[in-house]
Each structure stands twice: as structure tokens, then as C-alpha cells.
Amino acid sequence: MTRRARVLAAVAVVALAAASAALALAPGLFRAAKPKLPLPPPGEAVKAAAADIEALEFPSGRGEGEAAELVDVGEMDAAEFRRRLEAFPGKCVRLWMPGERHWLLVGRREAALPLAAALERFAADAGLGSLVGAFASYAGSREEVMPAFEEKLEGKVVPQWFVTREVPRFDWIDFAGIDDDIADETRAEIRSRQVVRRLVLEGNIAAAKAGDEKTLDDAVDCWRRAALRNSADPILVDRLERLARNGDTFYRLGKVQQAMKCYETLIAVHPNDDAARAGFAACLRRLGKDDLAAKVLESGRRHSWETQGEK
């Protein structure tokens, strides 16, 4: 080797050593530069619920100075959401929660909502869901939810910060032109949907704290009881849709045990969920338990027949 070649080789060794030392001193350098993945968009249940709420709030369409916005609070803390809430236009601002992460802010010129006009809108539009069902997502007026910010709220925004134990007032609903018996029935149904929503959130809280099987069982029990009373609750549907997606993803990645837990939860909440049973059976077959997989599918068919016979 010539003298020039020996010098170049020595320089290369020194450069390589320096680069290795730099990496050792800053192991998180390249990890920090990794782009953050975008949060998933709202699911179909959330979008449908938001459309129903807008039709309820604006049966004749939005007027001047009125607004509605579906806000993704997934990465917001209390301070950021408070600024968003305070700055939202409208004399009367109401907060609705069609999803765990996607909340609807509505700004109106006046608080009173004529229910008769909303009933006509829902009757005329076959694409809308249940008018009464939309009330499940109501959290409160801006004035009603603002006291929550007086507490020490840490971490990302969650629904339970703003959903009180007591069902909010619905004195802004104008029942003029509605028969008394229909008005009374509507009030009772609205309250029932609100009670179910609190049960769903109780399950979500238990799931977030789940450090053992019992706590997770408590969450599943809440969701199961909620599903029996209002299986169309948007936050419940949103949670179950995510469980189904997670189960399918775990299965494709070969993480069979995690997938089975997702499918098992779905079956516990909705015993007639054929897709969840099929997923659970597929996991069992992958584990070599073909006989047990067949029994799972058979028990699902038997349960479906029994429940149909009860109707």
C-alpha cells in the first residue's frame, strides 16, 4: 500500500469512529425526526351521528352567524380545547360528542330549538337516523361545560371531563305544536339515551384503567348493559368499530392472542356479532384448535336462533 493510500485509510477510520461516537451520544436523533402518523378520520357511525345533530340543530339550514364544526380533539389538551370553545362563533354554543375523539361544536343565534321543525326534517329525509338518538351525544351548552376547566385537567381531552353525573338540562327544546303525550315520551327517551351514554363512558374509563382482568370485565359489563338499552349509541359504536379494526390488524400481524381478546370483547357485548365470532374462530384455527373453532361458530348460530325466537 502506498503512503497516500495509508493516509486515506487512516482518515476513513477516524471519520467512522467519530460518526459512531456521535450516534452513541445522541441515540434519539433519528427517532425524533420520524414523522408523526396522522390520526384516523372519524368512522361512519360518528359522521352519521354528526349529520343527525346538524339536522336537529338546523332543521331549515344554517342561518347567518350560525356554525357547526366537527373537531378532532385527539391531540388537544384542556387549554387548547378551551380556547377553541371560547372562540367558537354563535350567541348560543352547544357541545355534542358523537365520538370519543370527534366532537361537534354548534353555534346558533338563539338557544331555543323548535322540535316540531326538527321532526319534519327527519321525517322528510330518509338518510337521517333517529332524532331522539341524536340527543345521546349532547354534553351541554358552553356555559354548562366551562366549569370543568376549573379542575386540574391533565393529558389529552376526554369526554368524561365534560359529561357530568347529572343529565344536562334540555329546557332549550321548544315543544310547541307537539302533543303532550309525544312530548312526555320524547323527554323520557332523551333521558334514557343520556343515561346510557354515561354507562358507555363508565366502561371507557374502566378500560383505560384496566390493569387486571376484573377491571376489563367491568368495562365489558358496562358496554354490554349499554348495548342492551341503546346499541346505536355513537361512542359505543365507535369504540366497537375500533375494537374490530384492531382485532383484524392483530390477526394479520400474527398477534393471535391480542386479536382474540378484541373479538372476545365484541362477542361479550354483542353475542350475535357474526364477524367477531368468525374472527375468534379463525384465531382458534390458527392455534390448531379446529374443534373448538367449530363449537364457537355453532354456539353463535344457536344463540342467534334463540334470540330470534324470543322476538
Image (cartoon, rainbow, N blue to C red):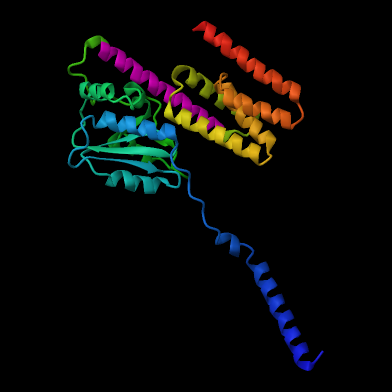
Q: Quadrant of the N terminus?
A: bottom right
> Residue 11 is drawn in which quadrant?
bottom right
In the orientation shown, which residue stands out farthest toward the bottom? 3
Q: Is residue 156 above or below residue 208?
A: below
The relative height of residue 310 versus residue 243 in the rendered view (above or below) is above
Q: Residue furthest top?
A: 310
Name the residue: 58% across, 26% down: 275
Residue 183 percent coordinates (x, y): 26, 14
Q: Is residue 158 found inside the magenta-colored segment of the image?
A: no
Task: State whether residue 208 appears in this view.
Answer: no
Is 198 in the magenta? yes
Q: Position of residue 228 (x, y in %)?
A: 49, 17
Q: Is residue 233 visible to us here?
A: yes
Percent position of residue 149, x then y: 37, 41
The residue segment tinted magenta is 182-208
Residue at image position (62%, 34%) is 211
Extreme-right residue of the structure: 1
Q: Quadrant of residue 174?
A: top left
Quarter where residue 218 is shown: top right
Q: Is residue 144 above or below residue 271?
A: below
In-image side of 293 versus 30 (left or right): right
Q: Main secondary structure of the magenta part?
A: helix
Residue 170: % across, % down:
28, 24
Q: How many marks?
A: 0
| Residue appearing at x 26%, y 9% in the figure | 181
Q: Residue at x 74, y 80 (%)?
A: 13
Relative to 5, 271 lies left or right: left
**Side of 306 relative to 141 (left or right):** right
> Could you say which is closer to the camera, residue 114 or residue 55?
55
